[in-house]
Every structure is written in C-alpha cells, then in structure tokens.
Image (cartoon, helix red, strand yellow):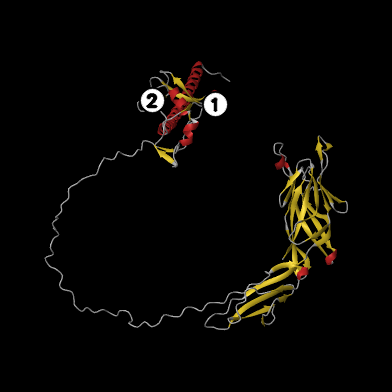
Amino acid sequence: MGGLSLVEILLTIGVIAIVSTISVLGLSGLNRNTQHRKLETDVKTLNSAITMYVANGGSLNGLSDPSAILVKLKSTRSKEDRAVHVGAPSGRLIDPRVAAVAVPTDSWKLRAVYNSGSQRFDVASSGDGVEFILDPSLAEVAATVETRAPGAVQYASNSGWVWDHANAGNPTAPQGPTDFATNPNPTDNAPVDPTPDPDPDPDPDPGPGPDPDPGPPPPPPVPWLPTPNFSITGGAHPEDDFPLSVAIVNVPPASQADPIYQIGSGPWTPYTGPVSVPMNSWLRAQFMTKDASAFQNSSQHSAYYYPVPDSLSGTVDGNFHSPSGGPNLAYQITNSDDRFAHGDPVFILDGEPINSGDPNVMSFTSQAFSNIPPGQKFKLGDFYYHNGSTYYDSHATGVSLRIIINLPERSQTIAFDLNLDLVNTENDPDDANASADYVRLTNLTQNIPLQINGVNYGIQLEFGATDSFGFSSQSQFHVYEGATGQGELLGTFVPR
C-alpha cells in the first residue's frame, strides 16, 4: 500500500486548521453573546432596585462609584425608620454577594457605566466600566444601617391616626371676613313664551278612580295555640328510670283549649296530668281549640324515649387469623392465637445465611372492663408490636384479629373482626417517624349483634395512648425501627 504524498499531507493539515479556527470562533461568539445578555439583565435588575430604593426614601446624591451604589442597595433601614415606614422595601434590595469588577478599556466585553445625573446604570461597549459577579466572601458581610428620608405616607408616630402625612400642613387662612358685592335689585331676564298653553279644561274627566266604598278591611288571621312542651326531653334515658313520668308544661287555660296526647299508635286521650311512658315509645301531644274564632289548633309535638344501660361489664379475647402478604410470606400464630410473627430476618450474603435479628412480632393482650355506660370509651386491650427486620418480601401486609366480648350480665356474647393493614416503611436514618412501621385499622365502626332493651348497638374503635417507643392516631399505631411499642385499643358502645 502506498503512503500519502507531501501535497496530500499539507492539504489535510490545512483542512484541520480551518475547522479548528471555525470552532474557536463559534465558541468565542457564544461566550460573547452570553456575557452581553447577562450584563443587560444585571443592569435592568439593578436599575429597578435603584428606582425602588429612591422611591422609599433612599438617596444616591453625590455618588458616582458603582461599588458605592451597590452598598446603598444592600443597606437596611434603622429600627426607628421601620416602625413608621409604610411599604415593604426596608431591607436589602439586592443579594449581598453582588460585587462590581472593572472591565478593561480594550476588552471585547460590554460594560456598565453609572450615570450620576440620571442615577441609572447604562450599557456601553467602550471606555471604563464594570461588570457584576457574585462574590461568596460577601455573603456574611453585615448590611449598612441607614436613616432614610420619610416617604409621602408614614405610620403615625405621635398621634392616634393610623398614618401621618409628610409635608401636608393646613394652608394659612386669611384673617377677617371675606366681602363681596351683591345686586339688591336683580332683573328677571327669562325669555317670554310667545305661544302660551291654552287654559286647562275646567272639568277634566277624572277616569275610573278608586272605589268610593271599599268596604271594611279583612279581619286579622286567627292565632295558633302554643306548641306543647314536655317536662322530659326525648332521647336516651337510664333503663332503671322507665317507665318515665312525662308532663306537658305549657297547657293553656281550660277556657281556651283541650290538651290531648298519644303514646305509640294508641288512641288520643285527654291530658289530665303526667303520662307514664314505657321504653322505646313515641309520645305526641296537641292543644285543641275551644273557640275557632279566637285560636287555631296547635301544632303537634313528638318525642321518642329509649333506654340505655347504666353500665356494661364484660371480658375480652382476641385471636389472630387470615394473614396476607407477598409470594414469600412467612408467619407463625402462637400463644393461643394472640401472638403473630411474620417475615424472615435471614438474608444471604455471598451464599451464607446471615440472621439479622427478630422478625416483626405483634401480640394482643385483652383486658376486662366494668361499669362502662354507652357513649364512654373503655379499654379492650393492648397491642405490642416489634418492628423487626425482614427480607425477600416475606413480611405480612395484613391480618385479622377476632375480638370476642362476653357480657355475662346481659347473657350476650358478641364477636367481630378487626381488619389490620401492616405497613412496612422504608428506613430513613434521618427521620425516625418516617421509618416507623405501623398498624392501620381499616374498619373503625363495627355493626355488632348487640341488643339491649330493644335498642341495637354498634361499637366504635380507635388506637389510644402509646409508650415512648411509638405514636398513634385514631386509626394508626406506629412503632420506631428496631423497637417494641405498646398501644391501647379503645372501644365505645354506641346506640343505633
């Protein structure tokens, strides 16, 4: 194979040189445009800051050095000024790191030139000037504190007004009365109408007009008799208080009305005194007028009365069952079904199994309760949850806890399932709360087969207090990474 001739080598070198020159020129032009755009933006921003500074009492008089202008724009008002100044610009108007550096006269760069006459920066392409940079060493330099001239409006400093007006004194009034000449005999110079209106018709047609005999006004509406009120309001009442003795407390005089009442779907009966109302009954009452021209019948008033136990007592038991999770779920339910362990703490390192500690463990310790009235919170038991280590998608994501409540005084046993989500969070060494795994109750309200004296009850559930190794909300119980936390399970019997 033949080599390159001298002519070919020289041509190749020439092409490379031309390409290199074009690249350098292109980069140079890019840098030039970037510097020009930056300087124009900086000048526009600084001129806006100057306008705001001067408008809020600042002064640039006698200054020509760009660096001195920047110091002024970084200054703040004195504490006394800020107390009465109306408006926002009381502090620095530009970044404290902004600095002015000189641009050589022979440089290709655009430069900023301060015009002390117009108090503005202008952009120039020649002569002495500056450009602006961020100098990190100026970040901690304290701002100059200055007293600026007051604005047109200031908050009041010595009066009870909201603000004081600067240079707004009252004008000086002239002394003595003001005299001016008047004409005591003015002449009526109104034009005369050459064609006055003809005389009006001496007997015009009055038209239909009002009815000369409208008759007597309609009679006022007949008032209603008052609505009956009961001595005991409707709603829940202690079961031992039934039957309730309920009276009507605002019966009209016997000359005006006859009071009547009804219990449930029974007959309407004349009221003569307090009524005996049994459990779970409606009581209705109405006043019937004796003179329809004087009063109308009253509206009916109704109230429903039902019993609630003075107290409930019972025992509680809890059993874990039906866990759910990923394809490698590992779990054990032990200790009479009130201890649930899940997840595999063993991981493989270089082919060797390494045990990292305990898996996640949750247990429920039930607690008996006594003398709890409906509507009052009581403790069903405690959750203990160990936030352990698990690998390879072996932890559970949910489990059910069967709660069994025995009410021996009522000869009733009720059972329901708590659906628990088990949320395994990502570990964050800088945020202990975010790293805490938690248990979430998804069915806080339970419809339970509990009926007392004909009244159906539900139960409202929530997490209560925790120890220092966790925290809770109504539906969530969180435990810190690697800790074992304790949290209460609370319930409330609620009439339906």
Decide if residue 120 is on the left or right side of residue 349: left
Q: In which quarter of the image is residue 453?
A: bottom right
Amino acid at circle 2 = Asn
- Inspect this view and state whether residue 91 appears: no
Residue at mark 1: 139
Sequence-earlier tag: 1 or 2: 2
How crowded is the residue under tag 2: few (<14 C-alpha within 10 Å), some, or many (20+)? Answer: few
Asked whether 44 or 485 is in front, the reply is: 485
Q: Quadrant of residue 450?
A: bottom right
Location of residue 331 with respect to 347 vertically, above or below: below
Residue extending farthest top: 6
x and y, in percent, of residue 190 in the image: 15, 59
Q: How many marks?
A: 2
Q: In which quarter of the image is residue 121?
A: top left
Residue placed at 11% from the left, 65% from the top? Answer: 194
Asked whether 489 or 302 is in front, the reply is: 302
How crowded is the residue under tag 1: few (<14 C-alpha within 10 Å), some, or many (20+)? Answer: few
Residue placed at 81% from the left, 58% from the top? Answer: 403
Residue at mark 2: 61
x and y, in percent, of residue 370 in the image: 82, 59
Decide if residue 81 is on the left or right side of residue 168: right
x and y, in percent, of residue 214 in the image: 36, 82
Placement of the N terminus among the 4 image quadrants: top right
- Inspect this view and state whether residue 55 appears: yes
Location of residue 125 with respect to 390 vertically, above or below: above
Residue placed at 80% from the left, 51% from the top? Answer: 382
x and y, in percent, of residue 301 in the image: 63, 74
Give the Cα separation between the discs numbered 1 and 2. Answer: 27 Å
Amino acid at circle 1 = Ala
Location of residue 112 with respect to 342 vertically, above or below: above
